[in-house]
Amino acid sequence: MKEQLVDKETAVLAKEKGFNEPCWDFIDINNQEENVISWIGDTFEEKLELAIYFVKCYRPTQSLLQKWLREKHNLHIHISRLAEGVWNVDIYKLAPIDDILMNNPLEFSNNKSFEDALEVGLYQALKLIK
């Protein structure tokens, strides 16, 4: 798996569902993709201090958002490969004792990658949060 940022739509939905962890990448108030690295300052914190006023929503990596979903909402996304370019996306709601409460298989093809399948799972998991 390669480290990949979530899509803009997923980032916006994540913000609506409560994700607000500072990240290097963000969507600014003009709906443009931005990166804190381009701001003035020596450290992430100094750069973020200036950029914070322009942040509409943070754009995390897929793995960071997946971790947030697991830790904050007990949602686990499991991706399994069914065939070449065909993936199954399961979303489990984990109770404190790790019982599987929900299984929502999503199957799609068109030679998508693992990261494409994970993006679908992340977006669908966010939609499950009330």
Image (cartoon, rainbow, N blue to C red):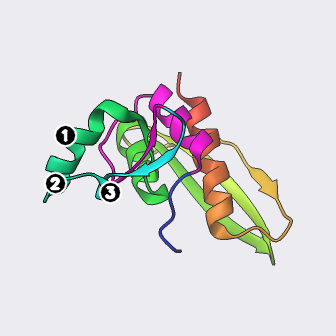
Does 117 appear above or below 98?
Answer: below
Tell me the residue at 61%/32% (across/down). Answer: 127
* Residues drawn in magenta: 7-29
Q: What element carries label 2?
A: loop
* 65 is within the stretch colored magenta: no
Q: Is residue 128 above or below residue 91?
A: above
At 16% from the left and 49% from the top, the residue drawn is: 45
Q: Nearer the viewer, residue 71 or 52?
A: 52
Q: Do the residues labelled 3 and 1 touch (CB within 8 Å)?
A: no
Q: In this view, does 4 lie to the left or right of 47?
A: right
Q: Is residue 80 visible?
A: yes
Which residue appears at 46% of the width and 51% of the height? 66
Residue 49 is marked as 1
- Residue 81 position, x and y percent, is 72, 71
Residue closer to the observer: 41 or 22: 41
> Which element type, helix, strand or loop, lies under badge 3?
helix
Kind of element beneath mark 1: helix
Outermost front residue:
40
Query: Of label 3 and label 1, which has the lower sequence position?
Result: 3
Mark closer to the observer (1, 2): 2
Q: Nearer the viewer, mark 3 or mark 1?
A: 3
